[in-house]
Structure formats: C-alpha cells, structure tokens
Amino acid sequence: MSALIAVDGWLAELSAQRRLSPHTVSNYRRDLGKLSHLLGEQPLETLSVHQVRRFVAQLHGQGLSGRSLGRILSAWRSFFGWLGERGAIPANPCEGLRPPKSPRRLPNALSVDEAARLLMPLDEDDSRLEVRDLAMFELVYSSGLRLAELVALNREALDSILHDNEVRVLGKRAKLRLVPVGRQACAALRAWAEIRDSLAAASEVALFVNRRGQRISLRMVQLRLAQRAIRLGLPRHVHPHMLRHSFASHVLQSSGDLRAVQEMLGHASIASTQVYTHLDFQHLASVYDKAHPRAKR
C-alpha cells in the first residue's frame, strides 16, 4: 500500500470524524512525512519493528529529543493501528516501542509581576486592536485557554462570560469544559463587546477578529503577544501557551488544589497537571533562598 495514500485517508478521517483541529492534523502530517521519507519505496505492510527502531535511532541521531520522538512514535502507532483495523497490515510495528528518555523540562511561566506588566494598556494607532488584544490575553491568563480554544470562540460565548463569569470551550478530542472567568478579564471582554461590531464583518461569527473583520489566526495572536512583550520591556519571548502555564502555576501557588487546576486546564490525566507542582516548589525555593538567613552559603 502507498504510504502517501494511506496517510491522506487517515488524516481525512481524523479531520472529518474525530474533528481534530487543523493544527493537530498538520502535526500528524508532519510526523508521518518523516515516516514516508524513511520508508522510501518500501510498502507499509513489510515494515518491521526492527526497522522502526532503526528509524527512531536515525531521528535521535539527527538531534530530535526523547519528547519529540515520543510524539512521533505516538502518531505512527495510531496510524498503523488504523491500518491494522482495516486489515492492511499484519501487525503494528510500533507496538511496545518507547522513545529514549530526555530530561523533563518545566513549563516556562511568567511571574505574577510579569503577567501584570504584560496586561498593561498600550497606545495603538487603531485603539480597537488594543481593546481586542487585552480582551484576548486577559481571557487566556484568567482561564488558562489553549490558543486554538481562544481563536475558536464565537461571539455567542460573550453571553456566558458577561452574565455567568464562565466560558465554555471545546478542547482536545472535542471535550467541552466550563472555566471561570475573572473580574478583570470580564471587564476587558465587556469593552471589546462594545466595539467588536465596528471591526468585524457583518457575517463573521468569531469572537475575535483581525483588521479585515475575519476570525483572527493562531499566528497573528502569537505575533501580537510577542510584540506586546517586547514593547513592555519583558526580558524574554512570550507566547500564548506561556500565559496558560502562568495561569496554572499562579492558581496552584495560591490554592494548592491540583484537581481543580486539572479540570480548568482540561487535562485528561492529572499526571499532565502535576508538572506545575514542580513550578510551585521552584517558587518556594526562591523565596527560601532570598529570605532564610541560612540559605546562602
């Protein structure tokens, strides 16, 4: 079976039936493109576990981390599982394979002071764009939304935000969740609601729109946030997921309620949320080092 034809069929099913986001489908396509390149002209059904192990070693030798290889192997395993269900291959050659371990990196989060500075108002040629940006970034920091979840919000979301102080988002694997929205985020969204229609196209249903009045893109949100951080003098690159990490670590530092943070982030497993307990310890260690008379040697 041709690898390209099989990959196209699997990705089409993921998009149409499982309703994965275009970003996720694009990542799967990239990971399976590596498989197609390594396979060359070899048919999929002849691939063995030993060859897959060699492919992984090749990619590791090219500098890919254990984390990246784990994601790639997961994509390959799911793809071959799909082929196996259709009788196209005799066995899944990725079953049982594990990527090499790599040091676990902690999420990069802003301090509370840095987050406050990032959400200070800026002067813009078009003040409507600044009102929109503040509404977007206040909402992400207030409720820990993923970038794709933010961009996918429609105007109707304003009703529950402004009346009930909560936002309903469609997360990974089409899982719905309700997340509280804080007072400052509600105020920023109320200001945006008052002027949104002056920027949005008449038929546009998106909550957040670009200069042309159409749904804002993922890339534009990333660029606007990075430029904002530079203008406000933050000493490092800031991206939307960093605001999500900051939300999680700041709520956990204040409440200590890991399960609540898991629910608000939409993590399927609490193991994904536990990384923020390490961030919390970093905060405590920093306070200790600065305050305790015996901390400095």
Image: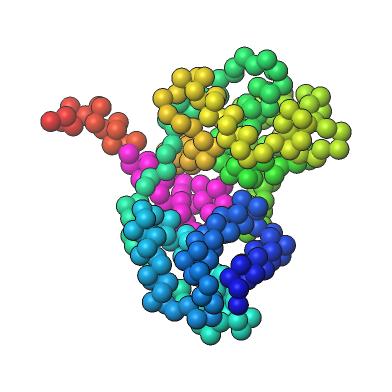
Name the residue at the front extreme: 41
Magenta includes 277? Answer: yes
Q: Quadrant of the C terminus?
A: top left
Image quadrant where residue 67 sits: bottom left
Depicted 39 relative to depicted 251: above or below: below
Query: x and y percent of residue 15 in the render?
Result: 69, 60
**Is 97 in front, or is 297?**
97
Q: Which residues are magenta?
A: 256-282
Instruction: Point out residue 162 in the picture as x, y percentages from the top left corner.
Output: 73, 33
Q: In x, y percent, where is residue 52?
A: 42, 72
**Left or right: where does residue 200 sit relative to residue 106?**
right
Magenta highlight: main SS: helix
Question: Residue 190, can we see it?
Answer: no
Residue for point 82% across, 28% down? 197
Q: Quadrant of the N terminus?
A: bottom right
Q: Is residue 11 left or right of residue 105?
A: right
